[in-house]
Amino acid sequence: MSVDLVKLDRALDRTIEAAFDPSLWKDVITGISDATGSCGANIIPLSERNRHLVVYTDSMARAFEDYFDGGWHINEWRLRGLPFLKRNGAVQDHQFTPRDVFEKHAYYKFHAKHGIRNGPSNWRRPT
């Protein structure tokens, strides 16, 4: 996967602006997704997850409809990674989910249904 650095730079330049105007985050993550050739991108708050707080690219709309309709926002699998994030400042899925669970757990089957790879999710604590 190649990254279009010009597009990525343009998208990242808008993050400061989006910090003050949250309505811009969708454009920012759409730009990042386009620049990296990703299937989509999203921002899910850790403290509260509801349809009005989650930001996602248009390509993720159906997946997030199922995310909320299926109750995944109530039992968000990746919250299991919070202790690693708090302790280390970053976390990847494999630190709290063994490979066999990646392949068998309903949460990851939900991802596969929507064409979302079950690769590592990288989180970083804000500095």
Image (tube, grey):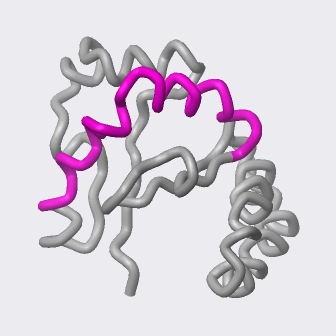
- Please, what is the dominant secondary structure of the magenta stretch? helix
The part of the image, by quadrant, that contains residue 82 is: bottom left
Q: Is residue 18 above or below residue 122?
A: below
In the image, taking residue 17 as reference, residue 101 lies left or right, namely: left
For the C terminus, the quadrant is bottom left
Estimate the x, y position of residue 78 in percent, counting from the top left: 28, 44
Q: How many marks?
A: 0
| Residue pictured at 57% horizontal, 52% vertical | 52
In the image, 61 versus 110, the foreground residue is 61
Q: Is residue 36 above or below residue 39?
A: below
Residues shaded magenta: 57-83
In the image, taking residue 97 as reference, residue 1 lies left or right, namely: right
- 65 is within the stretch colored magenta: yes
For the N terminus, the quadrant is top right
In the image, taking residue 37 as reference, residue 45 lies left or right, namely: left
Estimate the x, y position of residue 111 in percent, counting from the top left: 47, 23
- 73 is within the stretch colored magenta: yes
| Residue pictured at 54% horizontal, 27% vertical | 116
Estimate the x, y position of residue 54 in percent, counting from the top left: 54, 52
Q: Is residue 12 above or below residue 109?
A: below
Estimate the x, y position of residue 108 in percent, counting from the top left: 36, 22
In the image, taking residue 93 as reference, residue 37 lies left or right, namely: right
| Residue pictured at 62% horizontal, 47% vertical | 41
In the image, 76 versus 1, the foreground residue is 76
